[in-house]
């Protein structure tokens, strides 16, 4: 719902702020006071085009800004639109990057448009710069505008199927269709993955077999390349390793080697330790060192005796390493990755070899899924057909109350290719006058008559049409008397479910308001400005009296009191 509206430097609207209430909000005032300018400002907030001459004389730019409070049933929808457009879902997240909004969707949306002289504009949603096109996508869910010269929202045939489904009130049928279609689409995708002609599949299978034969014949083992690198290094340095090991044995066990020196040291300390026991630990360490040296010499002697050059083994290791490196280059990866790749190739080949059986299985599954999808579509068509008949009856009843019994709404349900939303194309058609042909809503000439037709349609759809705020601009044009009372009652009924902002010259409609705003043109400092005041009590009664007779006479005030009393007794259906 439109909670806060501020308009600055917008033609004669120098600085106007309106805090709007729930239910029916009416704007009244003399012709030319600026009521339609307020509607035009609201239209800009839903992505409407900006005129080059909007900024007030002497101002470089006009600014329109609003806070929309979202009803619970619209939050998830708006969150999806904001996310798809890359816009923040809360005002704070535009600055700090953190989405602090309710997980079910934002509670509020802040919109701001700056219109520069010449027609250029800047658009902001929740503080983030965006385009008018993006705003229009969002605005379609925030405001629906019907006026003398423009109609939005319900005239868009792209929304008619969704609106009819919401009116039908059978979400399980819509969800069943979506689920059935997703299952069918999944199977179709699996079949496509098996696609291609037989020749292409045979060539692919031959290629896979060749690759696998090469990898299988290599008998690759995980970590084999690292082990062979170590072995090659030892084989290539066999002579150097043997000579070094024998030299170390000689240093340990040769004449006057380390073992002999340690033995001599031990003998000297053994004598001295008998005199001073403090030398006993050192003596033990020398004995241990001599034993370790003897063990090391034995191991080195055994190593030197065992190692020998093997040119044939070295050549084999070199060939094996070259094979591993070539396969890694060819298949693009490390050895362990190449071994895994072989498993993937084998799985793909198995799939191709078993393609016919798999294809037969998927085809049977697809036939069953197609049948389920067609059944779901048929059920959805039946739901829409029932809803269409009910919608036509409800609109006809409302048109009769509006004195337009000759006008007729039809819901055209045409077959189309099966999809996620069923097999129906839905469009609302209208016969504005008897004898005329049915035409799409968007092609029916606009005017007060069409505004009342749209009112009848919105009354029927008030629970199904997910729009936060309806705007009616001079829906009362050319009517009076009983019809005026009927229009007022119907607008009041629409406002039971949605916030309604209505510009009117009829007291019968204004009396129905939950909040009444008076728009007045005044002169301030030699310049014309518009001011907007919320009327209550006596002031409201005086305004209704003015609308009734041009002057707030006692008789007019009494009549105004009667209208207010009758409106206060109106029973609104919230069901």
Image (tube, grey):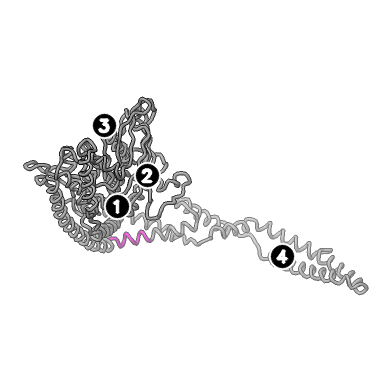
* Local SS, label 2: strand
Contact, CB < 8 Å: mark 3 with mark 4?
no
- Say above or below: 9 vs 536: above
The residue stretch that appears in magenta: 347-355
**Predominant SS of the magenta segment:** helix
Quadrant of the snapshot with the C terminus: bottom left
Residue 156 visible to an observer of this rendering? no
Q: Can residue 250 be seen in this view?
A: yes
Q: How crowded is mark 2: few (under 14 residues within 10 Å), some or many (20 or more)?
A: some
Disc 3 residue crowd, few under 14, some 14–19, many 20+, Cα 10 Å: few
Q: Nearer the viewer, residue 94 or 448?
A: 448
> Which sits earlier in the primary sequence, circle 4 or circle 2?
2
- Name the mark nearer the viewer: 3 or 1: 3
Q: Position of residue 369 (x, y in %)?
A: 23, 61
Q: Which of marks 2 and 1 is nearer the N terminus?
A: 2
For marks 4 and 2, give the one nearer the viewer: 2
Q: Where is residue 38 in the image (x, y as percent from the top left)?
A: 30, 37
Relative to the observer, which residue lies in front, 370 or 441?
A: 441
Mark 3 or mark 1: name the one nearer the start of the chain: 3
Kindly identify which numbered label has been placed on residue 200: 1
Cα separation, mark 3 vs mark 1, equals: 75 Å
Which of the two discs, 3 and 2, sits closer to the camera?
Answer: 3
Q: Name the residue under label 4.
A: 300
Question: Which of label 3 and label 4 is nearer to you?
Answer: 3
Residue under label 2: 67
The residue labelled by disc 3 is 32
Q: Residue furthest bottom?
A: 274
Q: Is residue 349 magenta?
A: yes
Q: Earlier in the sequence, mark 1 or mark 4?
A: 1
């Amino acid at each position: 719902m439109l909670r806060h509206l501020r308009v600055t430097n917008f033609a004669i609207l120098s600085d106007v702020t309106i805090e709007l209430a729930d239910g029916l909000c009416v704007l009244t005032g003399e012709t030319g006071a600026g009521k339609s300018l307020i509607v035009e400002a609201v239209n800009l907030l839903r992505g409407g085009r900006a005129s080059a001459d909007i900024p007030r004389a002497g101002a470089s730019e006009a600014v329109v800004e609003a806070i929309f409070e979202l009803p619970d049933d619209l939050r998830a929808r708006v969150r999806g639109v904001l996310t798809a457009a890359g816009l923040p879902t809360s005002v704070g997240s535009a600055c700090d990057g953190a989405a602090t909004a309710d997980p079910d969707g934002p509670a509020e949306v802040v919109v701001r448009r700056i219109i520069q002289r010449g027609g250029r504009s800047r658009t902001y949603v929740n503080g983030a710069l965006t385009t008018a096109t993006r705003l229009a996508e969002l605005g379609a869910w925030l405001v629906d505008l019907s006026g003398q010269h423009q109609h939005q929202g319900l005239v868009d045939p792209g929304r008619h199927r969704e609106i009819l489904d919401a009116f039908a009130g059978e979400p399980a049928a819509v969800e069943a269709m979506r689920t059935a279609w997703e299952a069918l689409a999944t199977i179709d995708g699996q079949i496509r993955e098996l696609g291609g002609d037989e020749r292409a599949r045979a060539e692919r299978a031959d290629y896979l077999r060749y690759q696998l034969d090469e990898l299988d014949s290599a008998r690759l083992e995980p970590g084999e390349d690292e082990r062979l690198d170590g072995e090659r290094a030892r084989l290539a340095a066999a002579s150097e390793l043997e000579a070094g090991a024998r030299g170390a044995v000689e240093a340990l066990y040769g004449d006057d080697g380390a073992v002999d020196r340690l033995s001599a040291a031990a003998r000297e300390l053994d004598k001295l330790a008998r005199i001073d026991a403090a030398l006993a630990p050192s003596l033990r360490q020398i004995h241990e060192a001599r034993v370790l040296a003897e063990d090391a010499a034995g191991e080195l002697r055994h190593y030197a005796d065992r190692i020998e050059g093997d040119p044939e083994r070295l050549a084999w290791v070199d060939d094996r390493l070259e094979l591993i490196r070539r396969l890694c280059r060819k298949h693009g990866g490390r050895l362990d990755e190449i071994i895994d790749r072989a498993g993937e190739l084998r799985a793909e080949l198995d799939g191709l070899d078993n393609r016919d059986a798999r294809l037969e299985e998927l085809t049977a599954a697809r036939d069953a899924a197609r049948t389920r999808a067609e059944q779901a579509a048929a059920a959805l068509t039946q739901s829409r057909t029932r809803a269409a008949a009910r919608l036509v009856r409800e609109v006809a009843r409302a048109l009769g109350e509006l004195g337009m019994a000759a006008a007729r709404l039809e819901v055209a349900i045409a077959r189309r290719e099966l999809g996620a939303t069923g097999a129906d194309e839905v469009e609302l058609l209208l016969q504005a006058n008897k004898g005329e042909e049915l035409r799409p809503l968007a092609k029916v000439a606009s005017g007060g008559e069409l505004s009342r037709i749209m009112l009848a349609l919105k009354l029927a759809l008030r629970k199904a049409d997910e729009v936060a705020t309806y705007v009616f601009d001079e829906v009362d044009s050319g009517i009076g008397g009983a019809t005026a009372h009927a229009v007022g009652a119907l607008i009041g009924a629409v406002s039971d479910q949605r916030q309604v902002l209505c510009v009117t010259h009829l007291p019968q409609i204004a009396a129905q308001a939950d909040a009444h705003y008076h728009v007045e043109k005044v002169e301030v400092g030699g310049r014309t400005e518009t001011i907007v005041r919320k009327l209550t009590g006596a002031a409201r009664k005086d305004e209704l009296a003015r609308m009734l007779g041009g002057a707030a006479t006692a008789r007019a005030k009494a009549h105004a009191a009667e209208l207010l009393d009758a409106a206060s007794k109106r029973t609104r259906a919230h069901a």
